[in-house]
Amino acid sequence: MTDADVHRTDSEEPPVELEHVTIENDDAPNECAIFPRHASGSVLTTTWITAHGEGFVDLEAMR
């Protein structure tokens, strides 16, 4: 991430605030669902992403 990614001009849209939940599965790996924090129910059905298994990496290792 660069300073350009963090600092925005007044004409840019504000960043989207994200929320997440961990879905614990008995018969499969746990999942993390990520979605817009203030989205309506109809938006939530199409605006989300899940991650599981090797989709997670150590933050320090990626810096």
Image (tube, rainbow, N blue to C red):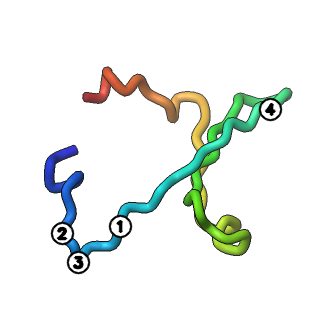
Residue 48: quadrant of the picture? bottom right
Q: Residue at x 26, y 73 (%)?
A: 12
Which residue matches tag 3? 11
Which residue matches tag 4? 25
Which residue matches tag 1? 14
**Mark 1–mark 2 distance (CA, rounded to whole Å):** 9 Å
Quarter occupied by the N terminus: top left
**Res. 24 mark:** none
**Mark 2–mark 3 distance (CA, rounded to whole Å):** 5 Å
For marks 1 and 2, the one nearer the N-term is 2
Mark 1: amino acid: Pro
**Mark 4–mark 2 distance (CA, rounded to whole Å):** 42 Å
Toward the front, the furthest residue is: 10
- Left or right of 40? Residue 37 is left
Which residue matches tag 2? 9
- Left or right of 25? Residue 29 is left
Residues tagged 2 and 3 counted as in contact (Cβ below 8 A): yes
- Left or right of 52? Residue 14 is left
Mark 1 surroundings within 10 Å by alpha-carbon count, few (fewer than 14), some (14 through 19), many (20 or more): few
For marks 4 and 1, the one nearer the N-term is 1
